[in-house]
Image (cartoon, grey):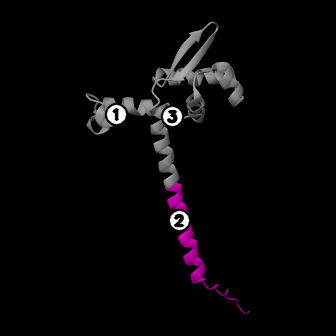
Amino acid sequence: MTIDNISGCPTMENLDDRAIEQVADFFGAFAVPMRLKILNALRSGERNVGDLTTEFECSQANVSKHLSVLAQKGLIAKTVRGTSAYYRIVDPRIYQLCDLVCVQIGQRFAHQSEMKDAFLQVARVAKVPKQKSATRRR
């Protein structure tokens, strides 16, 4: 589904300040590396807190705190089975958003690398002569 297919939903260019604040708050969920790791781990399907704690070698409290934020933002949902809670992605399109950001970052780094290489090549060709130090005679 593309943006064009979502009828009745405003695009960012048409939002007022309050709505922009909501968008910024939503994006805040992506601003913590552990939350991105959790989202990546959920790509392959449901996981429980114990699985994630073991995978990331961190405390259950830490994982639970980040799962809570992701759930509050509507990115993940919880299903309770027996004594365990399993978490899953609500809308897999969030991965398209994450992948778009990763591609943009990769392109930026590639451009920076090209600029650095071009600069170094020009510097090698120019071979700036060393300045002779002036010595004073007394």
Q: Where is residue 52 in the image (x, y as percent from the top left)?
A: 65, 25
Secondary structure of residue under mark 3: loop
Task: Specify which label sits upstream in the sequence, 2 or 3.
Answer: 3
**Looking at the image, is 57 positioned above or below residue 71?**
below
What is the number of the mark on residue 30?
3
The nearer-to-camera label among 2 and 1 is: 2
Q: Which of marks 3 and 1 is nearer the N terminus?
A: 1
In whole angstroms, how far apart are the C-alphas of marks 2 and 1?
A: 35 Å
Front-most of residues 105 and 23: 105
Percent position (x, y) of residue 1? 36, 33
Residue position for label 1 = 20
Above/below status of 4 relative to 138: above
Residue range highlighted in magenta: 108-137
- Badge 2 local density, few (<14 within 10 Å), some, or many (20+)? few
| Main secondary structure of the magenta stretch | helix
**Residue at 32% in and 36% down:** 3
Label 3, residues with CA under 10 Å away: few <14, some 14-19, many ≥20: some
Question: Toward the viewer: 13 or 136?
Answer: 13
Disc 1 is placed on an element classified as helix
Reading the chain from its start, which is encountered first: label 2 or label 1?
1
Residue 123 magenta: yes
Q: What residue type is labelled 2?
A: Glu
Residue 14 placement, left or right of 82:
left
Residue 53 picture quarter? top right
Q: What residue type is labelled 1?
A: Ile
- Residue occupied by mark 2: 114
Q: Indicate the position of residue 114 as horizontal and vertical percent values.
A: 53, 65
